[in-house]
Image (cartoon, rainbow, N blue to C red):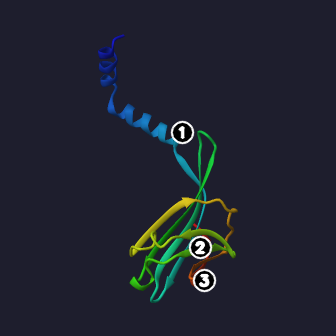
Amino acid sequence: MELLDIVSFLKMIPVYIWVIFAIIIVIIFGQRKVWEFEAKFFSNGIGRGEVEIECTSSKFNKTENLTIEVDLSLEPDWRNKVYEVFLNGSNILNISAEESYKSMNRIRRKYRGEKPEQNDLVEIKCEQEVVFSSKLYRD
């Protein structure tokens, strides 16, 4: 078969077959959430934020990916500072001043800590002072 024969054969396949094929590929190679925890924060005069710790897994290669995502919406006086995220007193993430200079900050990194539990304490500190504190809840 020549290349033109292959291309003409592929063009003959109906669109709905291509859609079914794409859905099957997504199911086989797609990621699924194993678990996800989140904590939401609000502090008058400082801003608001959210911390998400999640574990996703691929059905194909059976590996688990742990990530932590921090969303911060900070007032102007609280931007461009160093922040530390703590889970039950253990530092799990440092946010540099270069990463916190905007009003809306989204930081996503690999998480290398232990699996969190429901009601674990999450604190965000700035200059050794707790500015946000909340408990983790399963999402």
35 w.r.t. 11: above or below: below
Residue density around tag 3, few if under 14, some if 14–19, many if 20 or more, within 10 Å: few
The residue tagged 3 is: 128
Where is 83 relative to 52, above or below? below
Tell me the SS state at disc 3.
loop
- Is residue 108 rendered to the left or right of residue 89? left
**Where 106 falls versus 41 (above or below)?**
above
Q: Which residue is mark 1?
A: 28
Residue drawn at the location 34% of the way across and 17% of the way down: 6
Q: Nearer the viewer, residue 129 or 115?
A: 129
Dot placed on the residue nearer the N-terminal end, 3 or 2: 2
Quarter of the picture holding the C terminus:
bottom right
Work out how far the residue at label 2 is from the one at label 1, CA to CA, in angstroms: 35 Å
Q: CA distance from mark 3 to mark 2?
A: 11 Å
Disc 3 from disc 1: Cα separation: 46 Å
Task: Give the mark toward the camera: 2 or 1.
Answer: 2
Label 2: few (<14), some (14–19) or many (≥20) C-alpha neighbours in 10 Å: many
Side (left or right) of 130 relative to 100:
right
Identify the amino acid type marked 1: Ile
What residue sits 52% from the left and 44% below the top? Answer: 30
Give the residue drawn at x 69%, y 68%.
Answer: 117
Depth check: 118 or 18 in front? 118
Question: Compared to 36, does 25 lie above or below?
Answer: above
Kind of residue at disc 3 = Gln
| Number of the front mark, 3 or 1 | 3
Element type at mark 2 = strand
Residue that label 2 marks: 85
